[in-house]
Image (cartoon, rainbow, N blue to C red):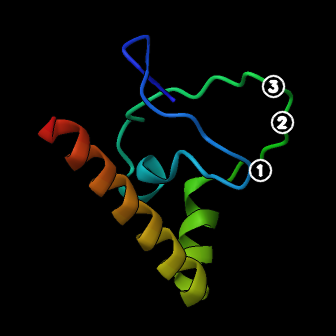
């Protein structure tokens, strides 16, 4: 994951990205560049929001992941 040309995080298999823009409709906050071959699933905003609405377990998992991301950013800012 890159911001301003600087690597700020590395994703591992099973991670997700792009959810912030899908949730709030705003511009993306980072870019993701693959270092190895990968498969991705691309969802538009409307289908994504339907899935989140219809699958409470997925919604909770997404919220937990976003909370971990906020905590990671908080720790990095505290340094």
Q: Residue at x 43, y 72 (%)?
A: 64
Real-space CA distance between mark 3 and mark 1, rounded to the nearest whole angstrom: 16 Å
Residue ranking furthest to the left? 78
- Give me the disc on residue 36: 3
Q: What numbered label is drawn on residue 5? A: none
Circle 2: element type: loop
Left or right, 48 with respect to 5, comes to right
Circle 1 SS class: loop
Report the mark closest to the observer, 3 or 1.
Answer: 3
Report helix, strand or loop for mark 3. Answer: loop
Mark 2 vs mark 3, CA separation in Å: 6 Å
Q: Residues within 10 Å of mark 1 (few under 14, many from 20)?
A: few
Residue at the spot 68% in from the left edge and 53% down from the top edge: 43
Quadrant position of residue 58: bottom right
Q: Position of residue 8 (x, y in %)?
A: 42, 28
Which residue is nearer to you in this view: 70 or 42? 70
Compared with 53, 78 (above or below) is: above
Question: Label 1 belongs to which residue?
Answer: 41
Task: Say which label, 3 or 1, has the lower sequence index.
Answer: 3
Q: Quadrant of the C terminus?
A: top left
Query: Percent position (x, y) of residue 4?
Result: 36, 14
Could you tell me how far apart the alpha carbons at marks 2 and 1 are, in whole angstroms? 10 Å
Q: Position of residue 3 (x, y in %)?
A: 39, 22
Q: Which residue is mark 2?
A: 38
Q: Are marks 3 and 1 in contact (CB under 8 Å)?
A: no
Q: Residues within 10 Å of mark 2 (few under 14, many from 20)?
A: few
Cβ–Cβ under 8 Å for marks 2 and 3: yes
Foreground label between 2 and 1: 2
């Amino acid at each position: 994951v890159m911001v301003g040309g600087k690597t700020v995080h590395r994703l591992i298999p099973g991670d997700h990205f792009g959810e912030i823009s899908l949730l709030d409709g705003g511009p993306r906050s980072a870019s993701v560049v693959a270092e190895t071959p990968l498969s991705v699933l691309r969802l538009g905003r409307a289908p994504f929001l339907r899935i989140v609405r219809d699958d409470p377990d997925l919604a909770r998992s997404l919220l937990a992941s976003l909370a971990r991301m906020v905590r990671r950013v908080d720790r990095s800012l505290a340094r």
